[in-house]
Amino acid sequence: SQTIHQWPATLVQPVGSPLSLECTVEGTSNPNLYWYRQAAGRGLQLLFYSVGIGQISSEVPQNLSASRPQDRQFILSSKKLLLSDSGFYLCARKPAGGSPSTDTQYFGPGTRLTVL
Amino acid sequence: AQTVTQSQPEMSVQEAETVTLSCTYDTSENNYYLFWYKQPPSRQMILVIRQEAYKQQNATENRFSVNFQKAAKSFSLKISDSQLGDTAMYFCAFMNTNAGKSTFGDGTTLTVKP
């Protein structure tokens, strides 16, 4: 089966500290990978997406960066966290070049980040 | 850029009854996908149903069905025989065919009452 893991599940960090959130995917090769952020009671905002190793596209200017060092690994980072970085971070995958019948995004369990 | 609007922040329904959640979107693209996701208190995003824009036939998945009106850019979700486990936040999402970037609405919180 195709599984998405996110680590850690919950994180509390002080303002100004660094951040590293990890997403790993099993059971699929060369997927498209995505990072979304969800503010409390709101929808998901796309932050970054990647169509392959080392290929990162940023959707909104922000204090965060993303990297894809391996085919099935997607990392979200920050050098110095801001209060506004608090939220629920979701990683998603989609088959690369998916057919119309399979083109769908599937989500990991998420990471709850609180910046104090 | 695409926008997705869910105009009902909260809804409630009695167990075993039917409820419809509304969603409208705006896009200049002709080919795309539309989805409804369910987010229970665990916050896991669960795919409920998907619709391919080039298909006129409305998608159905067991108790869940959609009313897709492409010209009106409307994509509503109907839940039949509502169950207590359907209580969750429901998100409507638009996904383009280029890189699969998705835009989400702000969600509708659905409460199923016993």
Image (cartoon, grey):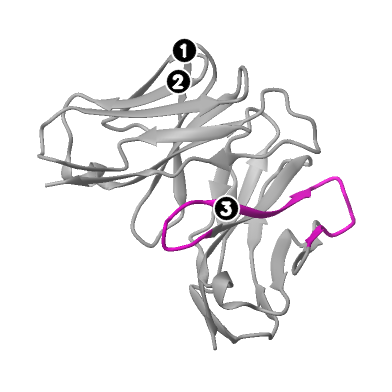
Q: Which mark is residue A73?
A: 2
Observer-nearest of B27 and B55: B55
On screen, residue A60 versus residue A85, left or right, reads: right
Q: Give, as a three-letter code, the residue at label 1.
A: Gln
Q: Which percent across, then down, holds residue B20?
A: 68, 76
Q: CA distance from mark 1 to mark 3?
A: 26 Å
The relative height of residue B109 versus residue A74 in the rendered view (above or below) is below
Chain name for mark 1: A
Observer-nearest of B2 and A39: A39
Q: Which secondary structure lies at badge 3?
A: strand
Q: Which residue is mark 3?
A: B46
Q: Which percent across, then down, holds residue B49?
A: 71, 55
Mark 2 Cα shell of 10 Å, populated few (<14), some (14-19), many (≥20) = some
The part of the chain drawn in magenta is B39-61
Q: Which residue is mark 1?
A: A70
* CB-based contact (under 8 Å), mark 1 and mark 2: yes
Mark 1 Cα shell of 10 Å, populated few (<14), some (14-19), many (≥20) = few
Chain name for mark 3: B
Chain name for mark 2: A
Q: Give, as a three-letter code, the residue at label 2.
A: Gln
